[in-house]
Image (cartoon, rainbow, N blue to C red):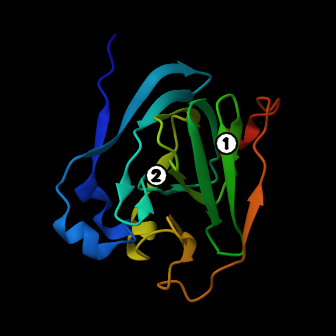
Amino acid sequence: MEVKPQIRYLKELEKVVYDKEWFKKAKNSPLYYIFRGLKEKNNLRYDITIIPPRMLGKEFVKTKGHYHFGNFGELYKVLAGEGIFLMQKRDLSDAYFVKAKKGDFVKIPPNYGHTIINPSKKILKIANWVSKECQSDYKTIEKMKGFCYYYTIDGWIKNENYKKIPKLKQRKPSKEMPKKLKFLYG
């Protein structure tokens, strides 16, 4: 069975892009490709996302980003390239990022929104396992015009649409797949 990618276009990120002036003049074009449901096992779905290198004006290309409805987590593995996984807790008590490269695992805890950034000149290819029951909430991030931080050519910039922004911390990726996957099931 051949799985066709869901293509995420620039216009779909209009509400979450940092550089609004650049966006006004930008042509709508594909940003990244999501191959959903390549495998299924134990009520989990395996997807692959490919994010080519690109700049969104002053900001590095990223996924639209979302929270999960319910108490679901997600697990990523970097297959090629390098990425930055930006996470923020739904109640904004915590925000952190993980820089990951080929072979690294990144765990998205329940109740954390996440976006993935390609800060390099190479294609970023990532795989993820997520519950088939999990639903994504994009509207909360759109309403705030993105996550509480943007990653730009000038580094991290706070999103001023948030009243409360936690200090951004860095955490390390895991070199091994977690042994316990209960966090994926909600």
Picture layout, residue 77 above or below residue 31: above
Q: Nearer the viewer, residue 76 or 119?
A: 119
Residue 74 screen position, x and y as percent: 62, 42
The residue positioned 17% from the left and 67% from the top of the image is 25
Residue 67 screen position, x and y as percent: 53, 58
Q: Secondary structure at mark 1?
A: strand
Type of the residue with mark 1: Ala
Q: Which mark, by number, is residue 136? A: 2
The residue positioned 47% from the left and 48% from the top of the image is 135
Picture layout, residue 73 above or below residue 88: above
Q: Nearer the viewer, residue 162 or 155?
A: 155
In the shown orientation, is residue 143 left or right of residue 8?
A: right
Q: Residues within 10 Å of mark 2 (few under 14, many from 20)?
A: few
Q: Nearer the viewer, residue 178 or 110?
A: 178
In the shown orientation, is residue 8 left or right of residue 35?
A: left
Q: Nearer the viewer, residue 7 or 153?
A: 153
Residue 148 screen position, x and y as percent: 55, 74
Q: Which mark, by number, is residue 100? A: 1
